[in-house]
Image: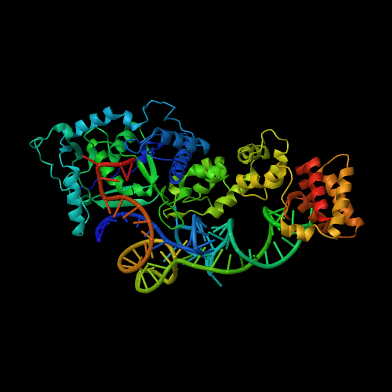
Amino acid sequence: MTPYRLPANPRARMPTAPRVRFAPSPTGYLHIGGARTALMNYLQARRFGGTFIVRMEDTDRVRSTAESVQAILDGLVWLGIDWTEGPGKEGPHAPYFQTQRLDTYREHSQRLLAEGKAYRCYCTKQDLEAQRESMEKSGGFYKYPGTCRDLKGPPAGRREEEAVIRFKMPSTEGTVSFDDKALGVITKPYSDLDDWVMLRADGIPLYNFGCVIDDHLMEITLVARGQEHVNSTFPQLMLYQALGWQPPEFAHLPLILGPDREKLSKRKHPEADVMLHKRTGIMPEALSNFVIRLGWSHGNDEVITREQMEEWFDFSDVGTTSGVWNPEKLLWLNQQWMKLLPEATVAERLVPFLEAKGFQAKGDSRLVPLVHALKERARTLEEMATTAALYFGTGVTLDEKAAAKHLVGDSLVLLRKVRDGVAALSEWTVESLDGVVKAVSESSSVGMGKVAQPVRVAITGNTTSPGIGETLLLAGRDEALRRIDAALTRGG
RNA sequence: GUCCCCGUCGUCUAGAGGCCCAGGACGCUGGCCUUUCAAGCCGGUAACACGGGUUCGAAUCCCGUCGGGGACACCA
């Protein structure tokens, strides 16, 4: 028997525009691995002027929820990944929810049944479970033994409507293989495959069945998904063969691992949640930048814009090794992006974080100057908001250590001089304020630090802040003077 | 257990037989700059899992060992 193989050059039939898809099962939030899969598919479509389809594989009826559908879509939108066909964007292959395509699956399973390439199976879950257990006890791995393979009709006391439909593996020797765009040729002997369930008794398809039917009907040319799916590619290939369909190309993406080196999972790894990062102040540009670099690179480039991704990304450059989640690098990238994006944009994104701290920040004229001063001192929007909050409130809590060091003795004299100087200023600007501090430093013959630190502690309560002129300006004239006076009073 | 995939600094990676006594980035670290903290700049630390081949020559090809991960459902 000749082993089944992909045609030598699958590309021949897809010269230009690829049709790719992201097919999540809506059983929770958007997973970071899913987000990367979606991103890569999206980039592929963008690069070659193709189509990116989102299809909801909602056939797990107990776990699928409408909220999850929304959560996944929201996550994609936040990341700036938009789809050409899918939920809310009905296209020529609608509907894009598998539970709305049940007639299609039934039709194709009937055909397979009629052609003798599938059969009804009456085994009960309990029976199968028992078989599996005993098989596992004796060592080997479980394969459905084909109990119902040659049944002519339902066994006594059973009805056809209770049967599931199984794929009938052709009894051939040899191996199946496919040429994965990322991994290369992967092979498996036919003998490792069994008669898997395609359709439940209620007509709901199982993953391997619905996936193949839809990918073909939606004219998908390249299936890119996580490496956890390489093994399911084989039964799927058998289905394509049975149906006489040309399989798409495949690209299996390296897994993303948690700090414990295990596949990033919703259960064990909170960072698997895309929207968690939004809440902690990571920006979508940074998250997608980070995630695209897991398993893919373009020379030595680290900070990569969406435009560059669209220009450079290709599945054949995707690596083979799983990558470990590195929070430090994500943080670094996020800061890079805070420095790269227009300050007005970052300011806008900062508002919700400030509001969460109880400040009416929207429209505040200090927002942009704040971002300007703080973007080099914060790695997340949340961090920036925490620092920014210092300038929004009234009064400040002095750090005891800082006060003990900088708000005593001669420092208070210097502070007094600065206070008088800035109070006399007709206009507060970074330059004029810095000028006062400089003048005090020179007239008193002490270093800038001697003068600036007491002021800094008085304004922020601590020893770290942006340049002293900026700090004063950010606090605002009235509040700055009030805080200096409070420090003076306390100290002297 | 069986099958599949993988194996370069702690982490993400460059590397497609000589350009590599292995390059970049994060982290860590020394210095410069400096009114603090950052940012920035300059420098340092640290890896081809192991063993056999093939070859004039291997991180790159082959085999084995070990190690890691994934999949083994009427989940996807």
Answer left or right for A146 relative to A243.
left
**Residue B50 screen position, x and y as percent:** 40, 72
User: Looking at the image, which residue is at 15% across and 45% down?
Assistant: A146
**Residue A181 screen position, x and y as percent:** 39, 47
As drawn, the residue found furthest toward the left would be A156
As drawn, the residue found furthest toward the right would be A443
Answer left or right for A463 relative to A218.
right
Residue A226 visible in the picture: yes
Residue A173 visible in the picture: no
When asked about the image quadrant of residue A424, the answer is: top right
Q: Nearer the viewer, residue A218 or A181?
A: A218
Q: Is residue A426 above or below residue B12?
A: above
What colouring does the structure picture have?
rainbow
Q: Nearer the viewer, residue A452 or A18?
A: A452
**Residue A308 screen position, x and y as percent:** 55, 43
Number of callouts in the render? Answer: 0
User: Looking at the image, which residue is at 87% across and 52% down?
Assistant: A416
**Residue A318 screen position, x and y as percent:** 44, 49
Quadrant in the picture for the C terminus of chain A? bottom right
